[in-house]
Amino acid sequence: MIYFFNDNALFAASVGFFGGLGAYSFWRNSSAAGFAGGAVIVAFDLFMRLRNNDQDVPLLAPNAGGHIWFIPVWIISLVVTGIGGMMWLGWL
């Protein structure tokens, strides 16, 4: 069976979910929760990737951190963070 994500992506997503849940309980705003959860996922995945010394280019290597369909999780989470931030500011 082929999996489209790895354990690091699942771990980063769970950390981001609980970060967003904490932001929601603090601000009671779902867009703030999306912004905070996405930012936590970006920070956590970049932390995992930059601490991995096994890869030559750890920011883009699928084995260095979390990936979904071979796209690094931090790239996907930047989109989520941007959408959540725009919703929080009222631009969407």
Image (cartoon, rainbow, N blue to C red):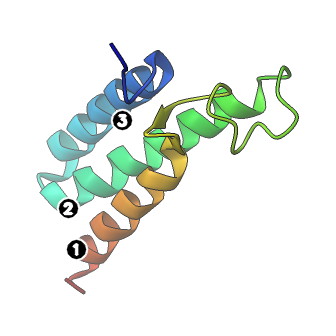
Q: In this view, does 34 lie above or below 42?
A: below
Say which label, 2 or 3, has the lower sequence index: 3
Say which label, 1 or 2, has the lower sequence index: 2
Which residue is disc 3 drawn over? Answer: 16
Q: Nearer the viewer, residue 72 or 20?
A: 72
Tag of residue 17: none
In three-dimensional space, the C-alpha distance between marks 1 and 3, rounded to whole angstroms, equals 18 Å
Spot the residue most to the front: 1
Considering the numbered disc 1 on the image, is that residue within a helix, a strand or a loop? helix
Question: As shown in the figure, which amino acid type bears the numbered disc 1?
Answer: Met
Which residue is disc 1 drawn over? Answer: 87
Query: For residue 2, which quarter of the picture?
Result: top left
Spot the residue most to the top: 1
Say which label, 1 or 3, has the lower sequence index: 3
Q: In this view, does 33 lie above or below 5?
A: below
Question: As shown in the figure, which amino acid type bears the numbered disc 3?
Answer: Gly
Residue at point 82%, 40% (across, down): 57
Label 1–label 2 contact, CB within 8 A: yes
In three-dimensional space, the C-alpha distance between marks 1 and 2, rounded to whole angstroms, equals 6 Å
Question: As shown in the figure, which amino acid type bears the numbered disc 2?
Answer: Ser
Query: For residue 12, which quarter of the picture?
Result: top left
